[in-house]
Amino acid sequence: MEYKHIPVLLKETVEGLNIKENGIYVDGTLGRGGHSSEVLKRLTTGHLYCFDQDIQAINESRERLEKISSSFTLINDNFENLKKDLNEIGVNKVDGIMFDLGVSSAQFDEQDRGFSYRYDARLDMRMNQESSLSAYEVVNNYSLQELTRILREYGEEPFAYQIAKQIVKVRENKPIETTFQLVDVIKSVLPQKVLKKVGHPAKQTFQAIRIEVNRELEVLETALKDACEMLNSKGRVAVITFNSLEDRIVKRYFNSLTKEEVTSRYLPSSNKELEYILVNRKVIIATEEELEINNRAKPAKLRIIERK
């Protein structure tokens, strides 16, 4: 399907990277190339490396980027392998790395990918179509305890146990195969007052299953560490998150690099010099103007760190 891509926090992210025209930059989440396009426009002798585990995203972005410049390399891999992949092609240090986390709007709108509760499709939710674990396996094969845990931890779902119990009960008779079947199972155990609330009742469950399928939080923790280690002096990492779980991980890790460790109030502070500084003390969110044209930017939060 033809898709009009509107990148989130575009101006804030690209300006936040403080692009040098001869710099080496990385887009860990290429998607449909919105952020990469703007970075590429600012490079002359520099180079941009773009990662995406979704081959469809790689193929669709290639033509868009080629219209701007040839100074880019597309890498079809998960950004958790960013450091390894770049090292293998001789890139050990970079001037900036950006991550636009979660599922792209295009993936949500591709009905057959099974990411959205708005379309009926086979339960899938794999960002990497080669991956063996899909939402179908999670929903139909995970134990009651495992389902409860991921709904609670990754979805922050108050009715995690009730939903997990109902999933296990329903699948005893027949597998839960589609997104709409799963939505019906979720709705069947939620109180009326919850069903009447603003927002879709299946949102948190779908988020939890998607995070489990794609190992999103584990991948993020690995990538953040590697990205910060790869920075040149004055290099920056910019991360856009879309839920509180992701944002907490980014905030906690950035703070660990930029704040002195306090061991005891009776002991002097560590003399170890901090290597990183926060570029934005306060998290950056979308402006009212951006929200008017793209309401999907509402939960987005941008944090940026710089190596001294």
Image: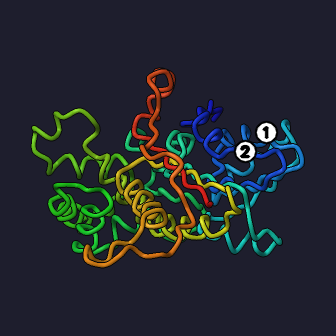
Q: Looking at the image, can residue 130 be seen?
A: no
Q: Quadrant of residue 268?
A: bottom left
Is the Cβ of the residue at disc 1 closer than 8 Å to that at disc 2? yes
For the N terminus, the image quarter is top right
Residue closest to the eye, 182 or 207: 207
Q: Amino acid at mark 2?
A: Ile
As drawn, 56 above or below 224: above
The colour mode here is rainbow
Residue closest to the eye, 29 or 210: 29
Q: Position of residue 97 (x, y in %)?
A: 65, 55
Query: Which residue is at a point 28% across and 39% down the rendered structure image?
Result: 200
Q: Residues within 10 Å of mark 2 (few under 14, many from 20)?
A: many
Q: Residue 268 vs residue 8: left or right?
A: left
For the C terminus, the image quarter is bottom right
Q: Position of residue 160 (x, y in %)?
A: 20, 60
Give the Cα distance between marks 1 and 2. 7 Å
In what element is the residue under mark 1? loop
Q: Residues within 10 Å of mark 1 (few under 14, many from 20)?
A: some
Q: Residue 6 vs residue 114: left or right?
A: right
- Disc sitting over residue 188 in the figure: none
Q: Which residue is mark 2?
A: 19
How many callouts does the rendering have?
A: 2
Which of the two discs, 1 and 2, labels the residue nearer the N terminus?
2
In what element is the residue under mark 2? loop
Q: Position of residue 101 (x, y in %)?
A: 51, 52
Query: Which residue is at a point 24% across and 62% down the rendered structure image?
Result: 152
- Disc sitting over residue 42 in the figure: 1
Q: Looking at the image, can residue 276 be seen?
A: yes
Residue closest to the eye, 191 or 102: 102
Q: Position of residue 180 (x, y in %)?
A: 34, 46
Query: Which residue is at a point 39% across and 52% down the rendered structure image?
Result: 178
Q: Amino acid at mark 1?
A: Arg
